[in-house]
Amino acid sequence: MEIYQAAIEDLEGVSELFNLYRVFYEQASDVEGAAAYIKNRLENKDSVIFVVKDNQEYVGFTQLYPTFSSISMKKAWILNDLYVEAGARNRGIGEQLLRKAKEYAMETGAHSISLSTAPDNFSAQRLYEKNGYVRDSQFFHYELTVD
């Protein structure tokens, strides 16, 4: 298995995984939309995507978005997406992606990595907690949809 930062050459493989990720979160399949979205992220360099390949097959990815922490006055990362293809689960791929994200955050001088997951995604919660992520009990997460 190899894990590396995705480039435009990985567009098709990453887009397929991204589409499956969205379907997992009960969104309609949209392969063309997924490809356009990932292409924009890669071309504009406004996110960092790490991908895992096993025998030339794309089996997992994570996508990080940059942000800043006013309190620490440092860069921070939002781990917005993490997905492992169903047939490749329980092989440590999610942990590899989390480890790569942590290494990248440290290399870029970031203060932290934050993430959110669905309240009923217990397997993801176990994975995150096993890897040192702590559920926030100090702050509530709010969101305003504007479209």
Image (cartoon, rainbow, N blue to C red):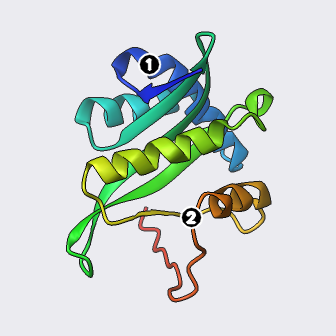
| Dot 1 alpha-carbon crowd within 10 angstroms: few under 14, some 14 to 19, many 20 or more | some
Residue 68, can we see it? yes
Q: Are marks 1 and 2 in contact (CB under 8 Å)?
A: no
Q: Position of residue 133 (x, y in %)?
A: 57, 65
Q: Residue at x 74, y 29 (%)?
A: 88
| Dot 2 alpha-carbon crowd within 10 angstroms: few under 14, some 14 to 19, many 20 or more | some
On the rendered structure, is 45 left or right of 36? left
Q: Residue at x 63, y 42 (%)?
A: 94
Label of residue 130 in the image: none
* Quadrant of residue 130 within the rendered picture: bottom right
Q: Depth check: 76 or 29 in front?
A: 76
Q: Position of residue 114 (x, y in %)?
A: 46, 64
Q: Residue at x 70, y 31 (%)?
A: 85
Element at label 1: helix
Dot 1 or dot 2, earlier in sequence: 1
Q: Tell me which amino acid carries mark 1.
A: Asp
Q: CA distance from mark 1 to mark 2?
A: 25 Å
Label of residue 116 in the image: 2
On the rendered structure, is 122 left or right of 72? right
Label of residue 10 in the image: 1
Q: Tell me which amino acid carries mark 2.
A: Ser
Residue 32, can we see it? no
Question: In which quadrant will I find the C terminus?
Answer: bottom left
Q: Position of residue 63 (x, y in %)?
A: 45, 43
Q: Residue at x 55, y 27 (%)?
A: 52
**Residue placed furthest toward the top:** 56
